[in-house]
Amino acid sequence: MGKKKVMVPADEVDLATVKYQYEEIEAPHLTGIGLKLFVKVLEAPLIGSLIISQLKKKNKMIEMLRNTVIPETPMFKPEFPPREPETGVVPVDEDQRPEERVELALKSLPDYEPAKSLSTDASSTFRYWKIRDYAYAYRSKITTPSIVAERFIAAMDKFNNMKPPTPLLISYDPELVRKQAAASTRRFEEGCPVSILDGIFMAIKDDIDCFPHPSKGGTTFFHEVRPVEEDAASVGRLRSCGVILVGKANMHELGLGTTGNNPNHGTARNPHAPERYTGGSSSGPAAIVASGLCSAALGTDGGGSVRIPSSLCGVVGLKSTYGRTTMSGSICDSGTVEIIGPITSNVEDAILVYAAILGSSTAERIALKPSLPCLPDLTSNEISHVSGSLTLGKYTEWFNDVFSTDISDKCEDVLNRLVENHGCKMVEIVIPELHEMRTAHIVSIGSESACGLNPDYEDGKKVKFTLDTRTNLALFHSFSASDYVAAQCLRRRLMYYHMEIFKEVDVIVTPTTGMTAPVIPPAALSLGETNMQVTGNLMRFVVTANLLGFPAISVPIGYDKQGLPIGLQIIGRPWCEATILRLATAIEELCGSPKKKPQQYYDILKGE
């Protein structure tokens, strides 16, 4: 008796009574042999269930999911109300050819100044080459895609032989790279490149199909049970734009982790500090962009998996609205929290790649009724005026819940400069039930992942998964159908709170992660690691956009006292990618180009 709790309907919650709950995750930190023994016990009948049950109780999951009456009806996918159109934008027809959309995106950018962009002044601060820099170099015959391909191949050899190893790609064939580069070089010689993306080098995360490469999802076996016969829709769109697809980028196995640890293929290293994690699960895509080897990469984001590694590696990561870009051809194509999104070194390149890959599936158009995709018009003198008209929502207690005040202080400084320089308005907001948000997200993504993996798990493949994947699956398998429905009731409730907030603000701003790149324990390299405290710090601010389907972007804004990158996250209203891209551009201009060259960096444009 006395266990039952009843939640007040969301529209009756008094925000003045809401108190922020600091996250305290109760779970062991294990690596090496200790993790191996823990998994053996966890998978044992009876005792394993008891351990999982105890951990769920300590973290108040059972109280929330089974002892609480949630008055809202379930929302099994994000549902968005009609919204006002964005201002200062360029509308895009998603039925256009990708090349045509990219051309529209190109015309929405400020004028390109090659003398300024390609400066070789030794005193210049470090900056990444942009896609337009490569395109100019190709058109001006400064170099060719084939020359850059040879530099890329040489750089890959160098990175593969580094100590410690730096495994950026899981599947890679130099001859395929040469073949694509030769075709692009011919197009430039004939004066007919297909788009601004022609000859641009990009990597594809290992859970997105890129024919003829296998999709292993970071495992040792998944390609055997799920053969690849064609490109994923997003990859095909890039290929039609002339992109050179270099291979399949490393990742945390099956996307079920936030560090990028992978004992199967080796753990990708953070280019800024090779003894530290990249973040995950899109570890390889973020590392290969931050290393200068690719202008862009595609990742998947079901729980911050594009934004977390982008923040930790000092690059840009874009998560679009749920359903904006079809997941067709990805391993995680049937969930309700995942998207495919670009990782790039700058916001301009994110706009170009996003324009190429956007486009909902037929089913998503019927179910979600997406509004017309738009890109920010960055050509006008009104850009500062439009950015300055934005209202930014900040929940201070949540914003300051970080492992190091270096993060919150740096993010706060950037926001203050936005207010001072652009005239943005800052508004204090309160977001109820963030703890419930995290519970609803883990139950949603966990149940959906387990559903997709169960046939192979039950078919004797369990022992082929890494130890931390098996730890996660043990938790996921403990969720019941009623747990999943309760999580969807929470989703509707949380959607109500956020849509009310978005009546008052244009975006919500937070740090991207609650900590900078964590150190890789040596024992984790061979057998893996489970560290829910680190996971909690990395995921604290990102799951809102996944559970509720909102667009979000991580922008690099500087470094902590250890020289590790810090990211600022912008969460937008549904379908308002143009707004967050515009604000991200303003933030990027305020912060200037990254001034710290990564320790592991290779300039494939200049070959140095």
Image: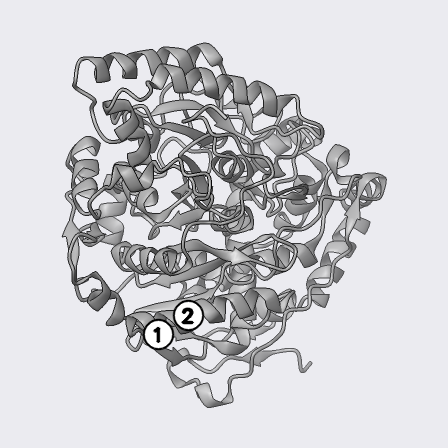
Q: Does 95 appear above or below 461?
A: below
Q: Secondary structure at mark 2?
A: helix
> Which residue is labeled 1 in the image?
419
Q: Secondary structure at mark 1?
A: helix
The picture places residue 309, in percent across and down from the top left corner, at 53, 46
Local crowd size for mark 2, using a 10 Å CA cut-off: few (<14), some (14–19), many (≥20) = many
On screen, residue 147 versus residue 312, left or right, reads: left
On screen, residue 40 versus residue 211, left or right, reads: right
The residue sitting at 56% across, 31% down in the picture is 250
User: Do callouts 2 and 1 mark residues in contact (Cβ within 8 Å)?
Assistant: yes
Q: Which mark is residue 415?
A: 2
Q: Quadrant of residue 56?
A: bottom right
Q: Nearer the viewer, residue 453 or 471?
A: 471
The picture places residue 390, in percent across and down from the top left corner, at 27, 70
The picture places residue 123, in percent across and down from the top left corner, at 46, 43
Amino acid marked by disc 2: Leu
Q: Nearer the viewer, residue 9 or 595?
A: 595
The N terminus, quarter of image: bottom right
Amino acid marked by disc 1: Val
Tell me if I can see residue 531 in this picture. Answer: yes
On screen, residue 37 versus residue 490, left or right, reads: right
Q: Nearer the viewer, residue 130 or 262?
A: 130
Q: Quadrant of residue 233?
A: top left
Q: Nearer the viewer, residue 369 or 88?
A: 88
